[in-house]
Image (spheres, coloured by chain):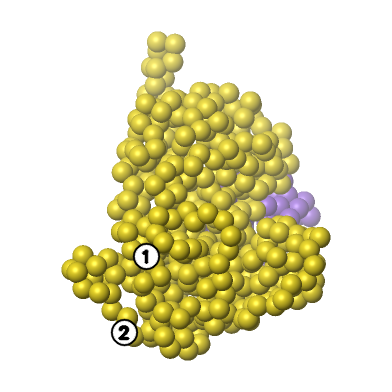
Chain colours: A purple, B yellow
Amino acid sequence: MSPDEARSKVLAALTSIAPEADPAQIKPRVNLRDQLDIDSMDFLNFALALHKEFGVDIPERDYPKLATLDGCVDYLCRSDPAS
Amino acid sequence: MADFVMPSLGADMEAGTLVAWHKNAGQAVRRGDIIAEVETDKGIIDIEVFTSGILEQILVPVGEKVPVGTLLARIREEGQTAEEKVAAPAISVDREPPKAPAALPAVAAEKIAGPAASSTSGDVTRLPMSPSARRLARELGVDPHTVPGTGPGSAITREDIQRAAAASTAKTPPSVSQPSVPKPQPPSADQASRMRAAIAAAMARSKREIPHYYLQTTIDFHAAETWLAEENLKRPMTERLLYGVLLLKAVALALQEVPDLNAVWEGDRVQVKEAVHLGVAISVRGGGLIAPALHNATEKNIDQLMREFRDLVRRARSGGLRSSELTDPTITVTSLGEQGVEAVYGIIYPPQVALVGFGKIVTRPWSVNNAIVPRSVITATLSADHRVSDGHRGGLFLSAVDRLLQEPDKL
């Protein structure tokens, strides 16, 4: 999966959790929880959406790697079973 | 014949707008079915029915805003024969109110059998007025039958009661020439500001009426955190737990030990509840707060509670809360740890008599086996109604929460 493709899927997952967020305004290196006022329940749902979309199992110890948009894209491209 | 009325879905709800009927007249309904949707200050709520039978007659059409307590529909209970239909209520804030303020709508004037719970004369349960206005009338010794309503659909508001009480104190007869103009509805008020207003009303009432006391304790969270990490490692992603669910279960079990905190204040006395329906404070995106019930929390295992917790948060944020979830909470639990604060001193949500707060998990120096070690701890607080319990009982409750969290596998 290309990074652009991964990015658009991550943004889709984020906007399903924070519908008011404008994907174009999400800063790639700033903590998503702070930018989007995401709590642990939102984050759990976000991780589950990524799990469903990318087919990867994300252990809790890897959650910090998903803290930013760039972090998510990087993590998911590395974990992509197809790559 | 059972009455299906506009429910009170919050401490200070005055009226609601019928936005959908899910059943037609003549259809069968079962206890627990969602038969209507009502728009309130807290969004659109699914309204459940508490009687099984046939939906005999729908009395309020979609689009109408009516006061709490208005008859919405009649249900012929199982085994009953059809009765004569009643006239549709004439109360609606979207229509012209009755010209004479004293003239009650047909259904509102209809009496129901049963002892009046109020000290004032007559049966006030059918007057178009919210429970909060009714309570105020009782407190101020005002007979609502003598009060002209100026609220939506001539409903009697808290202000009307206060005005009547003031007039009575001043030895002037209550004015019957109050203009019965419906209270202007803020046309541009968005949902967030209406929710803000509802929170403001409930919290102001709480601070006005409830003598709060506050307790705080720091709980060693090491065992819970360790157990949770190990447990989640074993689980598929879809079944992982959040630490919040451990807190909820510990609170529910601790309430079995100190049941006086699991109660509601009704009129001038406390009513202790057997079932523990935890009101879970959930922040709503865009501002605001709602605390719907996780029903029967003591009876559910941690997995079931987690599933319901997730579902409740989802529905609180995107719609689909049920009326019973708003009316049933027997205590509220709030966790502000994710916002980075260490402790929360909450305001009790009337008519409840207690609120439990949790702050964030922090690492602090802690004494373990006579050695100082870094340890994960969490601060638990209790706000409780001093009319109902004393600090001693509150202290026992927080101690129980602490003890229960030391054995997370037993929750």
Whole-percent x, y for residue B239 in the image: 70, 43
- Residue B397 makes an appearance in the image: yes
- Circle 1 crowding by C-alpha within 10 Å: few under 14, some 14–19, many from 20: some
Q: Is residue A11 above or below residue B226?
A: below
Quadrant position of the C terminus of chain B in the picture: top right
The disc placed on residue B232 is: none
Whole-percent x, y for residue B181 in the image: 38, 85
Q: Is residue B189 above or below residue B47?
A: below
Left or right of residue A79, residue B164 in this image:
left
The disc placed on residue B177 is: 2
How far is disc 2 from disc 1 in space, using C-alphas? 17 Å
Residue that label 1 marks? B143
Whole-percent x, y for residue B209 in the image: 32, 51
Quadrant position of the N terminus of chain B in the picture: bottom right
**Three-letter amino acid code at disc 1?**
Asp
**Three-letter amino acid code at disc 2?**
Ser
